[in-house]
Amino acid sequence: MTIPDEMVNHHYYEIDLRDIWQYEREAFFKQEISYEYADYLQSKIRKLIIDEDPKRGHKKGQPNEYTYSKYYKRFYEKKGLIEKEFMLDFFFDHETLYSYDKTLIINRKTSNYDYWFTLKLRQYDSNLLEIDNFLNYQIKSCFDNNYASFSRFLKLLVRQNSQDKHISSEVIFTVEEWILINSKKEESPINVLNSNPDVTEKKRIERKSNKNFIRSARKFDSFELIEFKKNTDYFTKNASNISEIISQLKKNKFIYDEPYWDRFVKIFSGEKIVPSERINWKASFQELNLFVSLLEYDLKKIEPLKNEIWVTTLKCFTKDGADISITQVRDANSSKKRKKLLLSILEKL
């Protein structure tokens, strides 16, 4: 969204209904949400205010009668016209006056917590650097630092977003990176030892040698072909091989039949990939998992990605034209069915 930074408090990590209302109202005025959705959102916000904090309502006959009467007239002059109702900081329900402009903190006990969490999360589209801080705050304040519970919640949120499209792909990528990074922390030898003081020295040594705990020293923008790093003319000198690889991937329905030369070269360059430059994968997630695994582990064609392997895959591929989540490709067991075929194609790279 193109909401001005001054309209968003990225350093306020509570999920505050007032904060959400102000942000979504600005989005409506910028025509970034539809009339239908604005009407739906307004109804949900009003219901939450009434249900969660009924005492905040001001009834007729209570003090400040003049203010009540003035607001009553203004509201019913605009009622039914969504763009005019969105200009108001208050509303009426059954003769009771309520204000949008009051803090209402949302937590896990709040009805539709996942929906409000999503609306708060998408505010970070303009400041991805603060997402980690927001998630760290929420896991502590609402999930008692229970990583398993919070990561499951986030994964379901990401899956739901594939239908609702409330959150941008950049925010999704950043959330999935947080899940992946913190999963490694959870599995680290230090955490395991702290949670179980009776672990033997033998098990400690085994964990230290486990490759799952090896972390990449940096983030990758795309795959880095080792031969290309040695010789920057590699793609030009091996143009016929590259064309044959692309042709075989298309013929065997691994990728869609689209113009791919520039995009294929780009994803192996180590350079940053914009969404429109990604390769559109046609085969299964299991075979995408196999494709990347063969390149790194079997053929050793690319620089070791370690824990960045699946995040980098998301940056380079879509599936049937749609964004991919880490869990979709990471948790898909590599397919053995066409391993020999794919191996014979990638060996030419």
Image (cartoon, helix red, strand yellow):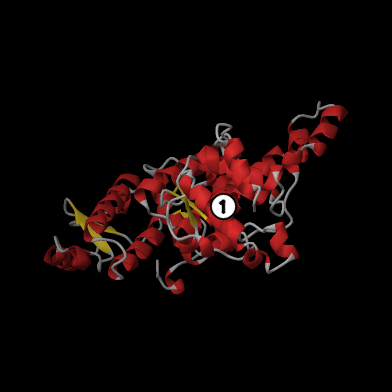
Q: Position of residue 102 (x, y in %)?
A: 37, 60
- Eyeballing the image, is 140 above or below 62? above
Q: Is residue 308 visible?
A: yes
Q: Quadrant of the N terminus?
A: bottom left
Q: Position of residue 110 (x, y in %)?
A: 40, 43
- Tally of marks: 1
Q: Position of residue 21 (x, y in %)?
A: 35, 60
> From this viewpoint, which residue is outermost toward the front?
240
The residue at the point 78 percent across, 34 percent down is 193
**In-front residue for pair 83/279:** 279
Give the amino acid type for the residue marked by disc 1 in the picture.
Ile
* Image side of residue 12 versus residue 115, left or right: right
The residue at the point 68 percent across, 43 percent down is 184
**In-front residue for pair 255/106:** 255
Name the element at disc 1. helix
Find residue 187 and report its image quarter: top right
**In-front residue for pair 198/218:** 218
The crowd level at tag 1 (other Cα within 10 Å; few <14, some 14-19, many 20+) is: many
* Image side of residue 81 versus residue 21, left or right: left
The residue at the point 58 percent across, 32 percent down is 336
The residue at the point 32 percent across, 51 percent down is 49
Q: Which residue is mark 1?
A: 245
Q: Is residue 267 visible?
A: no
Q: Position of residue 290 (x, y in %)?
A: 59, 40
* Image side of residue 172 versus residue 215, left or right: left
